């Protein structure tokens, strides 16, 4: 998409703000029942539009959110990754979240994007740690968290579902 300023770049990816025109490409991810099997349900088209709008509000309020993950080689939107505020056990936390289109799993895109978001978070935010909320049975997502230096911190019940909270601390990367 021309005219969209990158927030972050990695060797293979560009992360940028979502625009409403991303809904169709994002739907291939969020509406896919296999990709979203650790969520209560896959999204509807209306849910995808709400996802984009919710992140656009985050950009305005927090100056970050989930960003569109775009292949630099083709300009194709293949997922999302970014930093979002979450309330866990009554405490405001900053989460690294990520989703990648199913046909591109196991190619390191989530790890590459999440590591860039981790570095960006520590460089730009006054936080001592970042978290990821991951369903216990979501082993691929747990592996991504571990590859970027996160460790299991604690179990929580979040949105009435069991989750593992993974954490990476600023000092652990020094």
Image: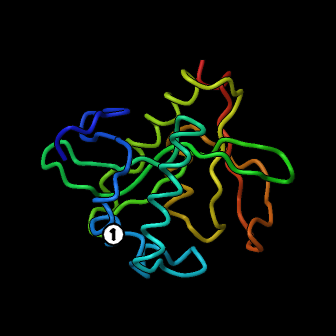
In which quadrant is the C terminus drawn? top right
Comparing 50 with 129, the one in front is: 50
Comparing 26 with 121, the one in front is: 26
The outermost residue toward the top is 174
Q: Could you tell me residue 68's position as x and y percent?
A: 36, 50
31 vs 23: above or below: below
Scheme of colours in the image: rainbow
100 vs 3: above or below: below
Q: Could you tell me residue 30's position as x and y percent?
A: 42, 71
The quadrant in which residue 93 appears is: top right
The outermost residue toward the right is 90
Is residue 116 rendered to the left or right of residue 70? Answer: right
- Mark 1, secondary structure of its residue: helix
Q: Which residue is mark 1?
A: 102
Residue lying at 35% horizontally and 71% vertically, measured from the top left = 27
The outermost residue toward the left is 74
Is residue 97 rendered to the left or right of residue 4? Answer: right
């Amino acid at each position: 998409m021309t005219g969209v300023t990158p927030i972050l770049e990695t060797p293979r990816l560009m992360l940028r703000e979502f625009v409403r025109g991303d809904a169709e490409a994002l739907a291939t991810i969020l509406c896919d029942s296999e990709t979203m099997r650790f969520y209560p349900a896959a999204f509807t088209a209306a849910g995808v539009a709400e996802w984009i709008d919710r992140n656009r509000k985050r950009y305005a309020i927090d100056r970050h959110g989930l960003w569109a993950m775009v292949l630099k080689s083709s300009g194709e939107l293949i997922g999302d990754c970014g930093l979002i505020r979450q309330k866990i056990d009554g405490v405001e936390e900053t989460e690294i979240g990520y989703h990648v289109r199913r046909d591109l799993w196991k190619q390191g895109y989530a790890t590459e994007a999440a590591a860039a978001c981790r570095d960006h978070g520590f460089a730009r935010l006054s936080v001592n740690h970042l978290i990821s909320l991951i369903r216990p049975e979501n082993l691929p997502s747990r592996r991504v968290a571990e590859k970027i230096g996160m460790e299991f911190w604690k179990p929580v019940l979040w949105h009435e579902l069991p989750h593992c909270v993974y954490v990476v601390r600023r000092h652990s990367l020094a």
